[in-house]
Image (spheres, helix red, strand yellow):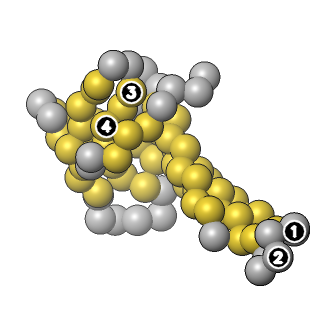
Amino acid sequence: MVLDVRWTFDASGGCSRTRIQTIIDSNGMTGTETDETIACSYTVSGSTMTVAFQGSSVPSRFSVAFSGGDLLLAGTRFQRIG
């Protein structure tokens, strides 16, 4: 299984998280892919990002930093692709 997570953030506080899951069969020849996108909003205070996902009443908090143009969100590096 391969899991790809993509975030989008806009300057007005809107965001979305897309999770793309690919399951490859045992011979590695074919696979199935599913994806899920959830809209959200975010705020940043210091080195903490608070994300409110649509449909959830409990916000998620992540440490946030930048390194060489990449986003470090809770210690996971995300490269800019767009």
Q: Mark 4 points at which residue?
A: 72
Numbered disc in front, either 3 or 1: 1
Question: Which residue type does callout 1 highlight?
Answer: Thr
Residue at the right extreme of this rendering: 30
Question: Which residue type does callout 3 highlight?
Answer: Asp
Q: Residues within 10 Å of mark 4 (few under 14, many from 20)?
A: some
SS at mark 2? Answer: loop
Dots 2 and 1: beta carbons under 8 Å? yes
Dots 4 and 3: beta carbons under 8 Å? yes
SS at mark 1? Answer: loop
Numbered disc in front, either 4 or 2: 2
Q: In this view, does 8 lie above or below 22?
A: above
Label 4 or label 1, whichever comes before in sequence order: 1
* Residue 2 in the figure: left or right of residue 44: right
Label 2 or label 3, whichever comes before in sequence order: 2
In the rendering, which numbered label is found on residue 76? Answer: none
Q: Residue at x 33, y 19 (%)?
A: 68
Label 3 or label 1, whichever comes before in sequence order: 1
Q: Which of 72 and 15 is in front in this view?
A: 72
Q: Pinpoint residue 8: horizontal percent, then vertical percent.
A: 52, 35
Question: Which residue type does callout 2 highlight?
Answer: Asn
Q: Pinpoint residue 1: horizontal percent, then vertical percent.
A: 63, 70
SS at mark 4? Answer: strand
Q: Mark 2 points at which residue?
A: 27
Numbered disc in front, either 2 or 3: 2
Disc 4 from disc 2: Cα separation: 35 Å
Disc 3 from disc 1: Cα separation: 32 Å
Q: Residues within 10 Å of mark 1 (few under 14, many from 20)?
A: few
